[in-house]
Image: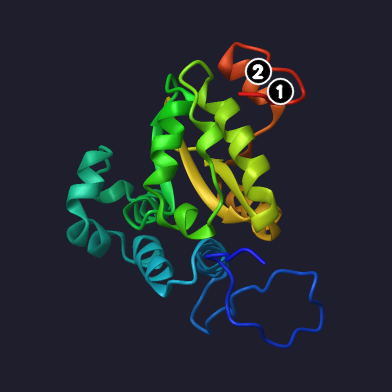
Amino acid sequence: MAWNPFRRAPAPSPDPQRPAQAEPHASDDDGAARWRELASLLSPDVGLAEVVLQAYSSPSEYFEAHSAEAENRGIEDDAVDPWFALVDWLIENELAHELDWKDNAAELAWALSRMSAVLSSGVDLQSVDDADAHLTFGMLRANALLAPAGLELLVFDIDSDSYTIVLVASANRDRVVALAAELGHRVDAMTLDHARHSGGRDYGDGIEL
């Protein structure tokens, strides 16, 4: 079995087909519980939940501690959004990468080579490297190769002309998408129709890059 960076030590479960969810803390309100669960699905590192919940419950403290990241995104003290805290943490910890909408699959391949969880999976993504294909087609190819390892790339929307590519466990995809929507944000799985629309070229159903 390929190593999966999201896999924890096995624990007894009444339903082995359902991904484990984070237990809410007694102090969590509904919003905090959702942010905590989303963070747990994206990384086993509790540091993600800590920074996201700080942005949620104490935005001024988050802004003071992470002023450089906030200012880089043009975020003011009174407009701190846990979504950007989550995205920036994932990028900083090599579970995500932000690419320009005009980038090609070769630039996607370069980004993936900098994501430690992708490298740790042991999946050979060399065939993604194609300067003549849009990055969306590169995502389709990468996901086809990552699927046997139980991994998938998703796009986290940050209301800009860039693609924030995030690596997730495939078993968590639907819940990640649903939680993002509940929290007022959007996560997209890459589809052939999306790639054709964004990439402007039709590579056919075989997704040959």
Q: Position of residue 188 (x, y in %)?
A: 61, 39
Which amino acid is tagged 1?
Asp
Which amino acid is tagged 2?
Arg
Q: Position of residue 171 (x, y in %)?
A: 70, 60
Q: Secondary structure at mark 2?
A: helix
Quarter occupied by residue 4: bottom right
Report the side of 125 relative to 144 (left or right). Answer: left
Q: Residue at x 43, y 25 (%)?
A: 161
Q: Residue at x 25, y 47 (%)?
A: 70
Q: Position of residue 54 (x, y in %)?
A: 34, 66
Report the side of 52 relative to 127 (left or right). Answer: left
Q: Secondary structure at mark 1?
A: helix
Dots 2, 1 in contact, CB < 8 A: yes
Task: Relative to 94, say whether 11 is above or below.
Answer: below
Q: Residue at x 54, y 32 (%)?
A: 128
Report the side of 69 relative to 31 (left or right). Answer: left
Can you see residue 136?
yes
Packing grade of label 2 (10 A; few <14, some 14-19, many >=20) is some
Residue ID for mark 1: 193
Q: CA distance from mark 2 to mark 1?
A: 5 Å
Residue ID for mark 2: 196
Q: Residue at x 53, y 72 (%)?
A: 29
Query: Which of these two is toward me, 160 or 196?
Result: 196
Quarter occupied by residue 21: bottom right
Query: Which of these two is toward me, 167 or 148?
Result: 148
